[in-house]
């Protein structure tokens, strides 16, 4: 149980980067971008093929980010310059990326990285060189804990990379360009009246969004030691689930607060999935069903709670009127609104 939850926290942090990208497109730009399902695999495919070809894992990961940015920019161009519906432009790019990803992977449906050096193996090697590694190993062995220092190294790496992406997101959205992108999502006509180029802002925003998604795909590929052309199916739902869960728990507020909520939402989502898969009658093939149920719950439960609060508020108001005026007629009229 603990091992499964520990792994879900690691994966949740990595998927949190993808969730931040989904947040940028869906919440900031108000753009239903389905490119995510394709750009996630693009990031993994570019990183995997470069690592297999002998390139540095760091360089391969950076190249994956660039590939994701290009994919998102093309989606934005189709919408902004081609005047194609936002949903349709994302679908078209997602379909095109399936073939492009196959080409990148040499027409192979998957690429294993079991015998290759990745960012994860590099960080584990670095962790092993730390002076207190031997002490921690002895401590964990004595306590008979179900994890090793190397897994803590991967967790530390996941925390570091997601913090870097989060801080970059906070900084970027507070800049002049970032504020213009936020205004474009809120009121494009208003920002156009201020002589801002909304087309360029949308293209840039979608490029950065898919760059985050591709970065997450590249890291997940190196974490799992393989990339599959179908691994991106349903990524947009996972990203939306993370955003919705985070907002349901933390509510809406500043950008700093929301980005934390999105990352925490991704971790909670992975933990819920890990626990759900341990239920006897559920199987691995039910993961999409579990995801749908989680999203439905995240959407419906907050609404039900809010309706309950509103009813209690009206009831308290009715009692207050009764105590103040003692008039049954006014109370009855108030209760009729409940």
Image (spheres, grey):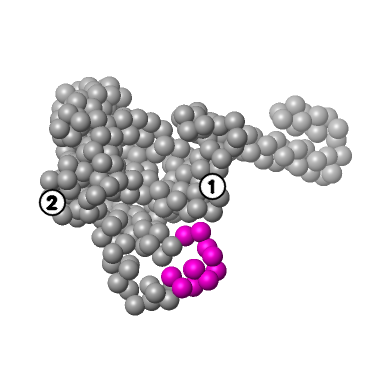
Q: Is residue 121 above or below residue 336?
A: below
Q: Residues within 10 Å of mark 1 (few under 14, many from 20)?
A: some
Which residue position is annotated with label 1?
Answer: 249
From the viewer's side, name the closer residue of 111 and 19.
111
**x, y percent for residue 270:** 47, 44
Vertical side of 124 occupied by 142: above or below:
below
Residue 96 position in % (x across, y down): 20, 25
Q: How many marks?
A: 2
Q: CA distance from mark 1 to mark 2?
A: 42 Å
Residue at (17%, 48%) from the top-left corner? 51
Q: Quadrant of the C terminus?
A: top right
Q: In the visual, does 202 lie left or right of 312?
A: left
Viewer-closest of 31 and 118: 118
Find residue 163 and report its image quarter.
bottom left
Give the structural element (helix, strand or loop) at label 1. Answer: helix
* Sequence order check, earlier mark of 1 and 2: 2
Residue 195 in sight in this render: no
* Residue 139 in view of the camera: yes
138 or 275, nearer to the observer: 138
Asked if 290 appears above or below 48 in the picture, the reply is above
Crowding around mark 2 (Cα neighbors within 10 Å: few <14, some 14 to 19, many 20+) is some
Please check the rendered image and state whether residue 140 is part of the magenta-colored stretch, yes or no.
yes
Which stretch is magenta? 137-147
Q: Nearer the viewer, mark 1 or mark 2?
A: 2
Q: Quadrant of residue 74?
A: top left
- Residue 55 is marked as 2
* Residue plotted at (54% across, 65% down): 144
């Amino acid at each position: 149980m603990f091992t499964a939850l520990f792994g879900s926290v690691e994966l949740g942090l990595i998927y949190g980067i993808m969730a931040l990208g989904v947040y940028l497109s869906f919440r900031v730009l108000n753009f239903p971008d389905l490119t995510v399902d394709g750009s996630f695999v693009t990031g993994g495919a570019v990183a995997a093929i470069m690592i297999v070809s002998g390139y540095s894992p760091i360089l391969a990961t950076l190249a994956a980010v660039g590939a994701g940015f290009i994919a998102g920019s093309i989606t934005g161009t189709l919408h902004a310059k081609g005047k194609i519906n936002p949903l349709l432009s994302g679908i078209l790019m997602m379909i095109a990326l399936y073939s492009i990803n196959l080409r990148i992977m040499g027409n192979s449906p998957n690429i294993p990285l079991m015998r290759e050096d990745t960012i994860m193996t590099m960080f584990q090697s670095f962790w092993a060189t730390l002076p207190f590694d031997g002490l921690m190993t002895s401590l964990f062995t004595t306590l008979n804990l179900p994890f090793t220092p190397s897994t803590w190294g991967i967790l530390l790496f996941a925390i570091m990379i997601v913090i870097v992406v989060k801080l970059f997101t906070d900084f970027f959205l507070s800049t002049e360009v970032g504020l213009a992108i936020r205004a474009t999502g809120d009121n494009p006509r208003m920002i156009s009246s201020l002589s801002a180029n909304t087309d360029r802002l949308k293209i840039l925003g979608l490029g950065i969004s898919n760059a985050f998604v591709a970065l997450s795909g590249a890291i997940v590929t190196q974490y799992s030691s393989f990339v599959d052309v179908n691994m991106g199916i349903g990524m947009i739902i996972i990203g939306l689930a993370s955003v919705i869960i985070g907002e349901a728990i933390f509510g809406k507020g500043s950008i700093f607060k929301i980005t934390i909520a999105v990352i925490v939402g991704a971790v909670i989502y992975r933990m819920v999935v890990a626990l759900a898969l341990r239920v006897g009658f559920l199987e691995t093939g039910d993961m999409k069903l579990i995801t749908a149920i989680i999203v439905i719950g995240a959407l419906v439960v907050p609404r039900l709670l809010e309706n309950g609060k509103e009813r209690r508020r009206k009831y308290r108001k009715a009692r207050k009127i009764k105590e103040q005026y003692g008039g049954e007629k006014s109370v009855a009229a108030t209760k009729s609104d409940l």
